[in-house]
Image: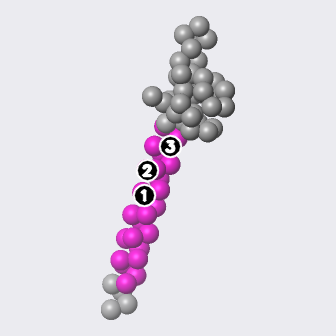
Amino acid sequence: MPSCIECGGALFYDRELKHYTCSSCGATYTSQDLLIEREKKFNAKFEEERKKRRRDEYLEWWLSSKQ
């Protein structure tokens, strides 16, 4: 079950409105909104891992040049 972007609460699908509604804060989202948010989170995680890998590679290079 998807969770709310704003508060993390449970989302329920309203067939009449064709929207997801948060049970906690009342925010509404379309399927497209949720898909875009999921993609943003995935890209942010991927970018964070890439930066960490580059930082680790640089540190390894820097330490090896000091020996």
Which x, y percent locates residue 28? 63, 24
* Start-end of magenta stretch: 39-63
Q: Is residue 59 magenta?
A: yes
- What number is the disc on residue 50? 1
Identify the residue at image location x=42%, y=57%. 49
Q: Nearer the viewer, residue 2 or 58?
A: 2
Question: Do the CB atoms of the residues marked 2 and 3 lie less than 8 Å apart?
Answer: no
61 w.r.t. 2: above or below: below
Q: Residue flagged by tag 2: what amino acid is it?
A: Phe
Badge 1: how crowded within 10 Å, few (<14), some, or many (20+)?
few
Secondary structure of residue under mark 3: helix
Q: Is residue 51 above or below residue 27?
A: below
Check if residue 56 falls in the magenta segment.
yes
In percent of the image, x 48 and y 30: which residue is there? 2
Residue to which mark 3 is pinned = 41
Q: Does residue 36 appear in this view? A: no
Where is the C terminus found, in terms of image quarters? bottom left
Q: CA distance from mark 2 to mark 1?
A: 6 Å
Check contact, mark 2 vs mark 1: CB within 8 A: yes
Q: Amino acid at mark 1?
A: Arg
User: Image quadrant of residue 33?
Assistant: top right
Looking at the rendered image, the disc whose residue lies closer to the viewer, 2 or 3, is 3
Q: Is 51 displayed left or right of 67 in the figure?
A: right
Q: Which sits earlier in the primary sequence, circle 1 or circle 3?
A: 3
Q: Is 53 left, or right, of 32 in this rendering?
A: left
Q: Is residue 14 left or right of residue 52?
A: right
Q: 10 and 42: which one is in front?
A: 10
Q: Main SS type for the magenta part? A: helix
Q: Tag on residue 46?
A: 2
Which quadrant of the rendered structure holds the N terminus?
A: top left
